[in-house]
Amino acid sequence: MDREAHDDDSIDDIDTNPLLPGHPRNELYIDSPIEETSSDAQQVAVIHSPPTGLNQPKLAGNVTYGPQGVRGLTTSRYVFGAAFLASLGGFSFGYDQGVISVVIVMEQFQAAFPEMSIDDPYQSYNTGLMTAMLEFGAFLGCFLMPSLADTISRKWAITVVVVVFCLGSIIQTAAKSYMTLVFGRLIGGVGVGTLAMGAPLYISEIAPPHLRGTLLVLEAVSIVTGVCSAYWISYGTSFLQGQIAFRLPFGLQMACAILLGIGIHFYPYSPRWLALIGRKQEALDSLAQLRDLPASDDTVKTEWEGIIAEVRFQNVMLERTHPRIGGIALELLTWFDLFKRKSWRRTAVGVGVGFFQQFSGINAFIYYAPILFRSLGQTHDMSLILSGILNLMQLIAVIICFFIIDLVGRRSLAINGAIAMTFPYVVMSFLAWMYSGSWKSHQGAGWLEVSMAFPETKGKTLEEMDELFGDLSGREENEVLREATETISRMRISLEDT
């Protein structure tokens, strides 16, 4: 495996590799509990010891710099800025999804693109193709982001993505033909897909450990906010005369993306990315800047040591699993590792949750709600208003989840949400079977159909999750973790001596 030269002689035995995926074990357990107050009186750092009964060193400790949850977002300018970046990234993604639902039923849009008019015999196919191109582009973009982010850094990868996103938006805004519009949606989709991966990746790597979950959930809130905002902006512009009615909302989707592309350069490089490519001292300086504390602060050093130990852990495990392999071949093999016997169950759960969440049909509601409600016998204006209310209900629900997810737990919230969705879906299916050919003569059934549209791993250690998913390779990992911890201990002594 190719290794890069190290920039710090005191830690030359720490292996690095720029093509490694992130690993969830990203902190360092300390052998005994320590509680310290940093030089900043407003930031209290607490370093917790491992749970009772675990005598092996682990990379899964807790390092906190202040209050958790929503209150923690205002503890420092960098944390607040990270929250702002999360909002911009999620908002841009949601806006690009939500802008199309009103646009495709605008008379001005259908006049400019006759292929989308109800008079065209292929209108349904043309509408579906244009909508699907965004999702197809996003699917392609998901495969581009990992290598791009590892090669040119998270910051510059997001900047490139913003340029691609804006290019797609410009093509959509200026399109004069249907095929040009479809091509613009495809390019915009590539930007959406890469942005959906890149922004959370960078945010999770620069955020304090105790706030990562909050910031990533905040991004999900921002996605729904973007969908809702795009809908009502498009609804408002639908009353304008001429093509400005749909070209304006198409163009506005660039605003937040541009702010994200510019704003991210006010932040340093990701400490984790710097560690992965061997620039360990720069990783420490970047982390100190992000925490608004001196590099000599014990808590900053502890978090930095956890990052370096994580890199060591990854490299040793990869070297044992795939000896003397590097580059693209190694990256492909790590993807295939997800489907090995010890990993396939958690892969199935992780992929399945995301797949079935989308397969539940929520995107169909986002894109086609006005068409759906109109097919149920509602007037054009009423179908638009009902679609907007549906989006508002989604926003209210996701905000509630933002505040209760840590209290209720991820698993129970997901299960109860799925059960709550099942009942209205069953009722909707039954009503559609009964009255799908005669909604106008069954207004009551139509309104009932409309009403139906408005509807744990918590507390477990990573080792307990391994057992839960049938992964019994913990002994080998504990051995590697012990080696990494001993290396970091020697490294800290060396730094203190200098």
Image (tube, rainbow, N blue to C red):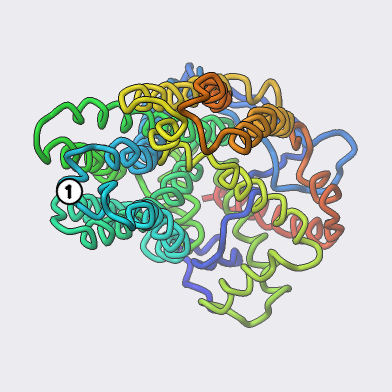
Q: Is residue 335 visible?
A: yes
Relative to residue 487, is residue 259 depicted above or below? above
Residue 311 x %, y %: 60, 59
Q: 63 or 227, which lies in front?
A: 227
Q: Is residue 194 visible?
A: no
Rendered location of residue 151, percent (x, y):
40, 66
> Dot 1 corresponds to which residue?
173
Q: The disc labelled 1 sits on which kind of residue?
A: Thr
Q: Quadrant of residue 105?
A: top left
Q: Nearer the viewer, residue 415 or 194?
A: 415
Instruction: Classify 486 as above or below 237.
Output: below
Judging depth in this view, the residue of 404 and 237 nearest the camera is 237
Image x and y of residue 93, in percent: 38, 43
Q: Secondary structure at mark 1?
A: helix
Q: Residue at x 40, y 41 (%)?
A: 367
Say left or right for 420 vs 464. left
